[in-house]
Image: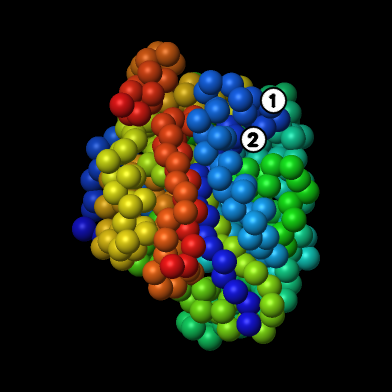
Amino acid sequence: MARIIGGITTSHVPAIGRALAKELQQTPYWKPFFDGFLPVHDWLARNKPDIAVVFYNDHGLNFFLDKMPTFAIGAAAEYHNADEGWGLPELAPHQGDEDLSWHLIDALVEAEFDLTTCQEMLVDHAFALPLELLWPEGPCPVRTVPICINTVQFPLPSAARCYKLGQAVGRAIEAWESDARVVVIGTGGLSHQLEGERAGFINKEFDQMFMEKLVSDPLWATRYSIPDLVELTGTQGVELVMWLATRGALLGDVAKIHSNYHIPISNTAAGLMLMENA
Amino acid sequence: MNNAKTRKIPGTTLFDSEMARKGYALNKMCFSFNSAACREAFLQDEDAYCTQYGLNAEQREAIRQRNVLGLLAAGGNAYYLAKFVGIFGLDMQDIGAQQTGMSKEAFIAKLAAYAK
């Protein structure tokens, strides 16, 4: 059976793409952010996952309001990045794993998670940048399965629902007849708000509690409704549901191997965590 | 309390069904700006481009003025509006400053102060 070797959660911000394109990693502004990934690079080099299942939210590259799935999963052999409107260099394509995609689709629908299945799917910065951050030497050595959760149009799926989706994904991976080593990745958050008179809102106290509880008591955050989470973490801070889905997929108890928290990257409180099953 | 329609969060509009309906044409136009050719077409003739997407008077005025709060009130969604403001080379600190009535320097300082 396939094995889940750990979970990695990180923020995603388009400005990271600009920093990579301009090679600003060691400038004073970016260094505390990029250096946070060094222990994760070591862990990945030692543990060598074959596949990454990635929870992320699309920002209007693949999906528009004409058809907006609450949960969508890729089932493609390859995933391409494209211009998101800012003319940044296109990020390298990522290899898919169609066998795991279809296994997950079968298992998740069976578990009453009725996802939209995508045999073609553009992946935006939220999917592609974290993979560049995790494997900066390139090319990305893992096959991937993207799972997209709607954070654009309300109502969003609840924190509790996203956690349960993660659990269903974790159980499905562990039941998959394969010797693959799978890492689960969640990208988004932490607190930030781009729009409105409250633009620039950050909540360090909540973020730090969230990171602590994600390890010890993951149901803690699922008590909050989505509007509660918007109030506490900002309109885009609510992307922390990707972290909950990732934690759910790890099933059981976990140990924190590494974390980093840095304010700000662009308008965002940037978080990073690496967890292993205890 | 879970209803986005009745919940009030200061300085924040949840992009709920009402906004999704109101802003559809505006957001569709902004979505088109993923394409460099569409960005160019907009810059060549803004009015014609807005007409092509069927923007209403409120949306057209907010587009003309590059007024982010106005665009949000007209049903714009932050993720699509980010593509519109990118045409003018504005980043998220420019946009944050505009919406909060601060200078860009003051807005950046406000973000950095959260680290303390």
Instruction: Name the amino acid, label 2.
Output: Gly
Q: Secondary structure at mark 2?
A: helix
Return the mark for residue A22: 1
- Please name the residue shown 62% across and 28% down the image: A25
Instruction: Give the residue number, with chain letter if any, for mark 2.
Output: A17
Residue B107 in view (yes/no): no
| A260 shown above or below A113 | above
User: In front: A255, or A162?
Assistant: A255
Instruction: Name the amino acid, label 1.
Output: Lys
Residue A72: x and y in percent read 58, 66
| A23 shown above or below A193 | above
| A164 shown above or below B12 | below
Residue B73: x and y in percent read 38, 36
Quadrant, the C terminus of chain A: bottom left
User: In front: A189, or B51?
Assistant: A189
Q: Do marks 2 and 1 both belong to one polypeptide chain?
A: yes
Residue B108: x and y in percent read 42, 20
Q: Secondary structure at mark 1?
A: loop
2 or 1: tag closer to the N-terminus: 2
Q: CA distance from mark 2 to mark 1?
A: 9 Å
| Crowd around label 2: few <14 · some 14–19 · many ≥20 (10 Å) | many
User: What chain letter is assigned to the residue under label 1?
Assistant: A
Residue A229: x and y in percent read 31, 51
Q: Residue furthest front?
A: A46
- Please name the residue shown 72% across and 76% down the image: A99
Q: Residue furthest left?
A: B1
| A24 shown above or below A274 | above
User: What chain letter is assigned to the residue under label 2?
Assistant: A
